[in-house]
Protein backbone atom coordinates (compact mmCIF):
# COMPACT_ATOMS: atom_id res chain seq x y z
CA UNK A 1 0.00 0.00 0.00
CA UNK A 2 2.66 2.46 1.08
CA UNK A 3 4.90 1.54 -1.84
CA UNK A 4 1.99 2.13 -4.17
CA UNK A 5 1.19 5.48 -2.57
CA UNK A 6 4.86 6.41 -2.80
CA UNK A 7 4.93 5.89 -6.51
CA UNK A 8 1.60 7.66 -6.92
CA UNK A 9 2.90 10.61 -4.91
CA UNK A 10 5.95 10.81 -7.14
CA UNK A 11 3.73 10.60 -10.18
CA UNK A 12 1.66 13.56 -8.94
CA UNK A 13 4.83 15.57 -8.38
CA UNK A 14 6.24 14.64 -11.77
CA UNK A 15 2.98 15.40 -13.59
CA UNK A 16 2.88 18.85 -12.02
CA UNK A 17 6.60 19.49 -12.54
CA UNK A 18 7.20 21.94 -15.37
CA UNK A 19 11.01 21.73 -15.29
CA UNK A 20 12.21 24.33 -12.82
CA UNK A 21 8.96 24.92 -10.99
CA UNK A 22 5.85 22.97 -10.06
CA UNK A 23 2.17 23.86 -10.32
CA UNK A 24 -0.09 22.97 -7.36
CA UNK A 25 -2.39 21.09 -9.75
CA UNK A 26 -3.03 21.46 -13.45
CA UNK A 27 -6.29 23.19 -14.39
CA UNK A 28 -7.25 24.79 -11.06
CA UNK A 29 -3.83 26.29 -10.28
CA UNK A 30 -1.65 26.23 -13.42
CA UNK A 31 1.18 28.53 -12.26
CA UNK A 32 3.88 28.60 -9.59
CA UNK A 33 2.47 29.45 -6.15
CA UNK A 34 4.75 30.77 -3.42
CA UNK A 35 4.10 28.60 -0.35
CA UNK A 36 3.04 25.60 -2.43
CA UNK A 37 6.48 25.59 -4.01
CA UNK A 38 8.23 25.78 -0.67
CA UNK A 39 6.33 22.75 0.67
CA UNK A 40 6.77 20.96 -2.63
CA UNK A 41 10.55 21.19 -2.19
CA UNK A 42 10.23 18.88 0.84
CA UNK A 43 8.73 16.20 -1.40
CA UNK A 44 11.39 16.57 -4.09
CA UNK A 45 14.04 16.36 -1.42
CA UNK A 46 13.13 12.73 -0.73
CA UNK A 47 14.44 11.77 -4.16
CA UNK A 48 16.26 14.74 -5.70
CA UNK A 49 18.05 17.35 -3.61
CA UNK A 50 18.90 19.28 -6.73
CA UNK A 51 15.29 19.56 -7.83
CA UNK A 52 14.21 20.54 -4.31
CA UNK A 53 16.59 23.52 -4.17
CA UNK A 54 15.73 24.50 -7.74
CA UNK A 55 12.03 24.85 -6.84
CA UNK A 56 12.70 27.54 -4.25
CA UNK A 57 15.48 29.13 -6.33
CA UNK A 58 13.01 29.60 -9.18
CA UNK A 59 10.54 31.24 -6.80
CA UNK A 60 13.19 33.65 -5.50
CA UNK A 61 14.33 34.49 -9.02
CA UNK A 62 11.09 36.53 -9.13
CA UNK A 63 11.84 38.41 -5.92
CA UNK A 64 11.54 42.19 -6.26
CA UNK A 65 14.32 44.62 -5.42
CA UNK A 66 12.42 45.47 -2.22
CA UNK A 67 12.64 41.88 -0.97
CA UNK A 68 8.96 41.17 -1.73
CA UNK A 69 8.25 37.66 -3.06
CA UNK A 70 5.05 37.32 -5.12
CA UNK A 71 2.31 34.84 -4.39
CA UNK A 72 2.01 33.56 -7.97
CA UNK A 73 4.61 33.59 -10.75
CA UNK A 74 3.00 33.47 -14.19
CA UNK A 75 5.82 31.75 -16.04
CA UNK A 76 3.65 31.20 -19.09
CA UNK A 77 0.10 32.14 -19.99
CA UNK A 78 -2.69 29.72 -19.18
CA UNK A 79 -6.22 30.62 -20.25
CA UNK A 80 -7.74 28.32 -17.63
CA UNK A 81 -6.99 30.54 -14.64
CA UNK A 82 -8.57 33.77 -13.50
CA UNK A 83 -7.27 36.33 -12.59
CA UNK A 84 -4.20 35.87 -14.79
CA UNK A 85 -1.26 38.19 -15.57
CA UNK A 86 -3.33 40.50 -17.76
CA UNK A 87 -5.45 41.33 -14.72
CA UNK A 88 -2.64 41.71 -12.18
CA UNK A 89 -0.42 43.83 -14.49
CA UNK A 90 2.75 43.54 -12.45
CA UNK A 91 4.93 44.88 -15.22
CA UNK A 92 7.64 42.34 -14.34
CA UNK A 93 9.25 39.53 -16.25
CA UNK A 94 8.02 36.89 -15.71
CA UNK A 95 4.72 38.45 -14.74
CA UNK A 96 3.48 37.86 -11.21
CA UNK A 97 0.94 38.96 -8.63
CA UNK A 98 1.43 42.02 -6.43
CA UNK A 99 0.65 40.28 -3.14
CA UNK A 100 2.66 37.74 -1.18
CA UNK A 101 2.02 34.51 0.79
CA UNK A 102 3.02 32.96 4.14
CA UNK A 103 6.85 33.04 4.21
CA UNK A 104 7.66 29.37 4.81
CA UNK A 105 10.70 29.29 2.49
CA UNK A 106 13.43 29.81 5.10
CA UNK A 107 12.03 26.92 7.13
CA UNK A 108 11.95 24.66 4.10
CA UNK A 109 15.50 25.65 3.09
CA UNK A 110 16.63 24.76 6.62
CA UNK A 111 15.00 21.34 6.21
CA UNK A 112 16.81 20.80 2.88
CA UNK A 113 20.08 21.99 4.39
CA UNK A 114 19.85 19.79 7.47
CA UNK A 115 19.08 16.59 5.61
CA UNK A 116 21.29 17.17 2.59
CA UNK A 117 24.88 17.04 1.45
CA UNK A 118 26.30 20.17 3.10
CA UNK A 119 29.40 20.39 0.93
CA UNK A 120 27.39 20.12 -2.25
CA UNK A 121 24.72 22.58 -1.08
CA UNK A 122 26.89 25.25 0.57
CA UNK A 123 27.09 27.51 -2.49
CA UNK A 124 23.35 27.25 -2.98
CA UNK A 125 22.71 28.17 0.64
CA UNK A 126 25.07 31.14 0.35
CA UNK A 127 23.23 32.31 -2.76
CA UNK A 128 19.70 32.06 -1.40
CA UNK A 129 20.44 33.23 2.16
CA UNK A 130 20.56 37.00 1.39
CA UNK A 131 17.32 36.65 -0.56
CA UNK A 132 15.60 35.05 2.42
CA UNK A 133 16.94 37.80 4.67
CA UNK A 134 15.63 40.44 2.24
CA UNK A 135 12.22 38.76 2.18
CA UNK A 136 11.98 38.76 5.97
CA UNK A 137 13.12 42.39 6.16
CA UNK A 138 10.42 43.31 3.65
CA UNK A 139 7.81 41.92 6.02
CA UNK A 140 9.15 43.92 8.97
CA UNK A 141 9.54 47.09 6.90
CA UNK A 142 6.21 46.90 5.07
CA UNK A 143 3.93 44.59 7.01
CA UNK A 144 4.52 45.30 10.66
CA UNK A 145 2.56 48.52 11.13
CA UNK A 146 2.41 48.19 14.91
CA UNK A 147 6.14 47.45 15.24
CA UNK A 148 5.20 44.40 17.26
CA UNK A 149 6.46 41.63 14.97
CA UNK A 150 2.86 40.83 13.95
CA UNK A 151 2.13 40.42 10.24
CA UNK A 152 -0.35 42.60 8.37
CA UNK A 153 -2.14 41.09 5.41
CA UNK A 154 -3.94 43.16 2.78
CA UNK A 155 -5.64 40.40 0.80
CA UNK A 156 -7.23 37.07 1.83
CA UNK A 157 -5.27 35.38 -0.98
CA UNK A 158 -2.05 36.39 0.77
CA UNK A 159 -2.94 34.37 3.80
CA UNK A 160 -3.33 31.19 1.73
CA UNK A 161 -6.57 30.68 3.72
CA UNK A 162 -8.70 32.54 1.18
CA UNK A 163 -12.20 32.15 2.58
CA UNK A 164 -11.45 31.58 6.24
CA UNK A 165 -14.21 33.11 8.38
CA UNK A 166 -11.37 35.01 10.03
CA UNK A 167 -11.77 37.54 7.18
CA UNK A 168 -15.57 37.74 7.08
CA UNK A 169 -16.10 40.85 9.19
CA UNK A 170 -13.12 42.77 7.79
CA UNK A 171 -13.93 41.85 4.19
CA UNK A 172 -17.61 42.73 4.45
CA UNK A 173 -16.57 46.37 4.75
CA UNK A 174 -15.05 46.38 1.24
CA UNK A 175 -17.12 48.32 -1.26
CA UNK A 176 -17.45 46.02 -4.28
CA UNK A 177 -19.71 48.27 -6.32
CA UNK A 178 -16.97 48.97 -8.87
CA UNK A 179 -15.87 45.39 -9.33
CA UNK A 180 -17.27 45.12 -12.88
CA UNK A 181 -17.92 41.85 -14.66
CA UNK A 182 -15.56 38.91 -14.78
CA UNK A 183 -15.71 35.17 -15.24
CA UNK A 184 -14.59 32.84 -12.47
CA UNK A 185 -12.62 29.86 -13.80
CA UNK A 186 -12.07 27.97 -10.53
CA UNK A 187 -15.63 26.64 -10.54
CA UNK A 188 -15.14 25.14 -13.98
CA UNK A 189 -12.51 22.86 -12.39
CA UNK A 190 -14.04 21.95 -9.05
CA UNK A 191 -17.47 21.84 -7.44
CA UNK A 192 -18.77 25.29 -6.51
CA UNK A 193 -19.68 24.06 -3.03
CA UNK A 194 -15.99 23.48 -2.29
CA UNK A 195 -14.95 27.00 -3.25
CA UNK A 196 -15.35 30.57 -1.97
CA UNK A 197 -18.64 32.36 -2.70
CA UNK A 198 -19.18 34.86 -5.54
CA UNK A 199 -19.43 37.71 -3.03
CA UNK A 200 -16.01 36.71 -1.67
CA UNK A 201 -14.60 36.71 -5.20
CA UNK A 202 -15.98 40.22 -5.71
CA UNK A 203 -13.94 41.30 -2.69
CA UNK A 204 -10.79 39.51 -3.90
CA UNK A 205 -11.05 41.23 -7.27
CA UNK A 206 -11.85 44.62 -5.75
CA UNK A 207 -8.73 44.38 -3.58
CA UNK A 208 -6.70 43.32 -6.60
CA UNK A 209 -7.89 46.39 -8.50
CA UNK A 210 -7.05 48.59 -5.53
CA UNK A 211 -3.47 47.28 -5.47
CA UNK A 212 -3.13 47.51 -9.22
CA UNK A 213 -4.26 51.16 -9.15
CA UNK A 214 -1.29 51.93 -6.88
CA UNK A 215 0.98 50.12 -9.39
CA UNK A 216 1.71 47.71 -6.59
CA UNK A 217 3.18 50.33 -4.31
CA UNK A 218 3.44 48.18 -1.19
CA UNK A 219 3.91 51.08 1.22
CA UNK A 220 0.72 52.74 0.00
CA UNK A 221 -1.20 49.47 -0.02
CA UNK A 222 -0.22 48.75 3.59
CA UNK A 223 -1.48 52.20 4.62
CA UNK A 224 -4.58 52.60 2.45
CA UNK A 225 -5.95 49.13 1.79
CA UNK A 226 -9.61 48.71 2.72
CA UNK A 227 -8.67 45.29 4.10
CA UNK A 228 -6.04 45.25 6.85
CA UNK A 229 -5.86 42.27 9.15
CA UNK A 230 -3.10 41.03 11.43
CA UNK A 231 -2.97 37.38 10.39
CA UNK A 232 -2.28 34.81 13.10
CA UNK A 233 -1.05 32.24 10.58
CA UNK A 234 1.41 34.51 8.76
CA UNK A 235 2.65 35.84 12.09
CA UNK A 236 3.35 32.38 13.49
CA UNK A 237 4.96 31.28 10.23
CA UNK A 238 7.20 34.35 9.94
CA UNK A 239 8.36 34.08 13.51
CA UNK A 240 9.23 30.39 13.09
CA UNK A 241 10.92 31.20 9.79
CA UNK A 242 12.96 33.88 11.60
CA UNK A 243 14.13 31.19 13.98
CA UNK A 244 15.00 28.82 11.13
CA UNK A 245 16.75 31.58 9.21
CA UNK A 246 18.73 32.33 12.37
CA UNK A 247 20.00 28.73 12.40
CA UNK A 248 21.07 29.15 8.77
CA UNK A 249 22.77 32.44 9.66
CA UNK A 250 24.71 30.62 12.38
CA UNK A 251 25.82 28.00 9.85
CA UNK A 252 27.13 30.78 7.63
CA UNK A 253 28.75 32.74 10.47
CA UNK A 254 26.48 35.76 9.90
CA UNK A 255 26.61 37.03 13.49
CA UNK A 256 24.91 40.39 12.88
CA UNK A 257 21.97 38.69 11.18
CA UNK A 258 21.71 36.19 14.03
CA UNK A 259 21.30 39.15 16.41
CA UNK A 260 18.79 40.88 14.13
CA UNK A 261 16.65 37.75 13.99
CA UNK A 262 16.89 37.13 17.74
CA UNK A 263 15.51 40.63 18.31
CA UNK A 264 12.64 39.97 15.93
CA UNK A 265 11.74 36.62 17.45
CA UNK A 266 11.65 38.28 20.89
CA UNK A 267 9.52 41.12 19.51
CA UNK A 268 6.81 38.72 18.34
CA UNK A 269 7.01 36.65 21.49
CA UNK A 270 6.58 39.74 23.68
CA UNK A 271 3.62 41.02 21.69
CA UNK A 272 1.77 37.84 20.79
CA UNK A 273 -0.97 38.64 23.32
CA UNK A 274 -2.27 41.18 20.82
CA UNK A 275 -3.61 38.12 18.95
CA UNK A 276 -4.95 36.38 22.04
CA UNK A 277 -8.74 36.50 22.23
CA UNK A 278 -9.47 36.24 25.90
CA UNK A 279 -13.14 35.41 25.38
CA UNK A 280 -12.28 32.63 22.98
CA UNK A 281 -9.19 31.57 24.96
CA UNK A 282 -7.28 31.16 21.71
CA UNK A 283 -5.02 33.00 19.28
CA UNK A 284 -6.82 34.39 16.26
CA UNK A 285 -6.40 37.13 13.67
CA UNK A 286 -7.35 40.74 14.39
CA UNK A 287 -8.90 43.35 12.14
CA UNK A 288 -6.52 46.33 12.25
CA UNK A 289 -9.23 48.77 11.14
CA UNK A 290 -11.90 47.86 13.71
CA UNK A 291 -9.45 46.57 16.31
CA UNK A 292 -11.63 43.48 16.76
CA UNK A 293 -10.45 39.87 16.92
CA UNK A 294 -11.92 37.52 14.32
CA UNK A 295 -13.47 35.42 17.08
CA UNK A 296 -12.71 32.17 15.26
CA UNK A 297 -10.60 29.22 16.31
CA UNK A 298 -8.92 27.83 13.22
CA UNK A 299 -6.15 25.33 12.58
CA UNK A 300 -3.80 28.34 12.52
CA UNK A 301 -4.55 28.96 16.22
CA UNK A 302 -2.54 25.81 16.96
CA UNK A 303 0.56 27.12 15.19
CA UNK A 304 1.46 28.83 18.47
CA UNK A 305 3.44 25.69 19.26
CA UNK A 306 5.22 25.85 15.90
CA UNK A 307 6.20 29.46 16.60
CA UNK A 308 6.98 28.60 20.23
CA UNK A 309 4.91 31.50 21.56
CA UNK A 310 2.31 31.85 24.27
CA UNK A 311 2.38 31.20 28.00
CA UNK A 312 1.95 27.83 29.65
CA UNK A 313 -1.62 28.78 30.53
CA UNK A 314 -2.42 29.79 26.94
CA UNK A 315 -0.99 26.52 25.67
CA UNK A 316 -3.20 24.60 28.07
CA UNK A 317 -6.26 26.41 26.75
CA UNK A 318 -5.21 25.54 23.21
CA UNK A 319 -4.76 21.88 24.08
CA UNK A 320 -8.20 21.84 25.71
CA UNK A 321 -9.64 23.23 22.46
CA UNK A 322 -7.80 20.57 20.48
CA UNK A 323 -9.24 17.91 22.75
CA UNK A 324 -12.76 19.29 22.34
CA UNK A 325 -12.36 19.58 18.56
CA UNK A 326 -11.01 16.03 18.37
CA UNK A 327 -14.20 14.79 19.99
CA UNK A 328 -16.29 16.41 17.23
CA UNK A 329 -14.45 15.27 14.10
CA UNK A 330 -12.90 12.07 12.86
CA UNK A 331 -9.77 13.74 11.48
CA UNK A 332 -7.71 16.58 12.90
CA UNK A 333 -7.22 19.48 12.39
CA UNK A 334 -10.29 21.04 10.79
CA UNK A 335 -9.51 24.49 9.40
CA UNK A 336 -12.39 25.87 11.47
CA UNK A 337 -13.76 24.91 14.87
CA UNK A 338 -16.54 22.40 14.06
CA UNK A 339 -18.71 24.03 16.72
CA UNK A 340 -18.69 27.32 14.82
CA UNK A 341 -21.93 28.16 13.01
CA UNK A 342 -19.81 28.88 9.90
CA UNK A 343 -18.27 25.42 9.81
CA UNK A 344 -18.67 23.88 6.34
CA UNK A 345 -16.85 20.57 6.17
CA UNK A 346 -16.12 20.57 2.41
CA UNK A 347 -15.68 24.28 1.68
CA UNK A 348 -12.02 25.18 1.34
CA UNK A 349 -10.84 26.97 4.51
CA UNK A 350 -14.14 26.82 6.39
CA UNK A 351 -13.73 23.28 7.67
CA UNK A 352 -11.52 20.93 5.59
CA UNK A 353 -8.22 19.53 6.87
CA UNK A 354 -5.06 20.70 5.08
CA UNK A 355 -2.02 18.44 5.16
CA UNK A 356 0.51 21.26 5.20
CA UNK A 357 -1.01 22.99 8.20
CA UNK A 358 -1.17 19.64 9.95
CA UNK A 359 2.51 19.14 9.27
CA UNK A 360 3.45 22.51 10.78
CA UNK A 361 1.13 22.10 13.76
CA UNK A 362 2.34 18.58 14.53
CA UNK A 363 5.98 19.62 14.24
CA UNK A 364 5.39 22.40 16.76
CA UNK A 365 3.45 20.20 19.15
CA UNK A 366 6.16 17.56 19.05
CA UNK A 367 8.89 20.09 19.74
CA UNK A 368 6.89 21.42 22.70
CA UNK A 369 6.65 17.97 24.26
CA UNK A 370 3.13 17.17 23.02
CA UNK A 371 4.13 13.98 21.19
CA UNK A 372 0.77 12.31 21.65
CA UNK A 373 -1.06 15.12 19.88
CA UNK A 374 1.66 15.30 17.22
CA UNK A 375 1.30 11.58 16.55
CA UNK A 376 -2.48 11.81 16.43
CA UNK A 377 -2.30 14.56 13.81
CA UNK A 378 0.25 12.60 11.79
CA UNK A 379 -1.88 9.44 11.95
CA UNK A 380 -5.01 11.32 10.90
CA UNK A 381 -3.25 12.97 7.97
CA UNK A 382 -1.81 9.66 6.84
CA UNK A 383 -5.23 8.01 7.08
CA UNK A 384 -6.78 10.77 4.97
CA UNK A 385 -4.28 10.29 2.16
CA UNK A 386 -4.61 6.51 2.35
CA UNK A 387 -8.38 6.73 2.13
CA UNK A 388 -8.84 9.47 -0.41
CA UNK A 389 -5.55 10.09 -2.21
CA UNK A 390 -3.74 13.32 -3.00
CA UNK A 391 -6.52 15.85 -2.67
CA UNK A 392 -6.05 19.51 -1.96
CA UNK A 393 -7.83 19.10 1.40
CA UNK A 394 -10.13 16.65 3.19
CA UNK A 395 -13.45 16.57 4.99
CA UNK A 396 -12.71 16.26 8.74
CA UNK A 397 -15.92 14.28 9.27
CA UNK A 398 -15.78 11.66 6.51
CA UNK A 399 -12.26 11.89 5.10
CA UNK A 400 -13.54 12.60 1.58
CA UNK A 401 -11.24 14.61 -0.65
CA UNK A 402 -12.21 18.21 -1.39
CA UNK A 403 -10.98 20.86 -3.86
CA UNK A 404 -8.42 19.94 -6.49
CA UNK A 405 -7.12 16.40 -6.95
CA UNK A 406 -3.62 15.30 -7.97
CA UNK A 407 -2.30 17.96 -5.64
CA UNK A 408 1.41 18.64 -5.34
CA UNK A 409 1.72 19.68 -1.73
CA UNK A 410 -0.30 16.75 -0.45
CA UNK A 411 1.98 14.41 -2.42
CA UNK A 412 5.04 16.22 -1.09
CA UNK A 413 3.82 15.95 2.50
CA UNK A 414 3.18 12.26 1.95
CA UNK A 415 6.72 11.65 0.75
CA UNK A 416 8.39 13.83 3.35
CA UNK A 417 6.33 13.32 6.48
CA UNK A 418 3.71 10.62 6.19
CA UNK A 419 5.60 7.84 4.50
CA UNK A 420 7.36 6.55 7.59
C1 LIG B 1 -7.11 30.90 -6.03
O1 LIG B 1 -7.06 31.33 -7.17
O2 LIG B 1 -8.05 30.26 -5.56
C2 LIG B 1 -5.96 31.05 -5.17
O3 LIG B 1 -6.16 30.55 -3.89
C3 LIG B 1 -5.36 32.41 -5.13
O4 LIG B 1 -4.14 32.26 -4.48
Image (cartoon, rainbow, N blue to C red):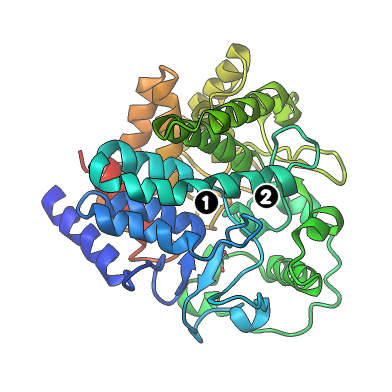
Residue depth check, mark 1 versus mark 2: number of the one nearer the observer: 1
Q: Nearer the viewer, residue 73 or 226?
A: 73
Badge 1 marks a residue whose secondary structure is helix
- Name the residue nearer the viewer: 277 or 347: 277
Q: Is residue 387 visible?
A: no
Residue receiving disc 2: 165
Q: Quadrant of the C terminus?
A: top left
Secondary structure, mark 2, is helix
> Is 245 displayed left or right of 149 in the figure?
left
Question: Which residue is rendered at x = 22% and y = 55% of the image?
Answer: 48
Q: Is residue 133 above or below residue 4?
A: above
Question: Dot 1: few (<14), some (14–19), or many (≥20) neighbours within 10 Å?
Answer: many
Q: Position of residue 25 (x, y in %)?
A: 39, 69
Whether ligand 1 has any atom under 8 Å from the Cβ at mark 1 is answered as: no
Residue at 47%, 43% (x, y): give it.
106
Tell me whether the residue at label 1 lies in contact with that at label 2, contact meaning CB atoms closer than 8 angstroms. Answer: no
- Dot 1 or dot 2, earlier in sequence: 1
Indicate which disc residue 131 carries. 1
Amino acid sequence: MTVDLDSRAREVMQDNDLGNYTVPTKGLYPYQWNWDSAFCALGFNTYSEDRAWLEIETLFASQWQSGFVPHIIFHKQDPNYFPGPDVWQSNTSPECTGITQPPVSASMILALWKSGDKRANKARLQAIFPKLVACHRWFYRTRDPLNKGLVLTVHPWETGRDNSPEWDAAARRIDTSEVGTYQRKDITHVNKDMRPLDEEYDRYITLLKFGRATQWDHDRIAKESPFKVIDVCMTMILSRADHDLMLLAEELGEAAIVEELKTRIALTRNNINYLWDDQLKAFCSKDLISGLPSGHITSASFLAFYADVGSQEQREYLLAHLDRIASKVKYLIPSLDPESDRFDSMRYWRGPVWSVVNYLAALGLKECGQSVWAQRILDDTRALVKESGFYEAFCPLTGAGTGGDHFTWTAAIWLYWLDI
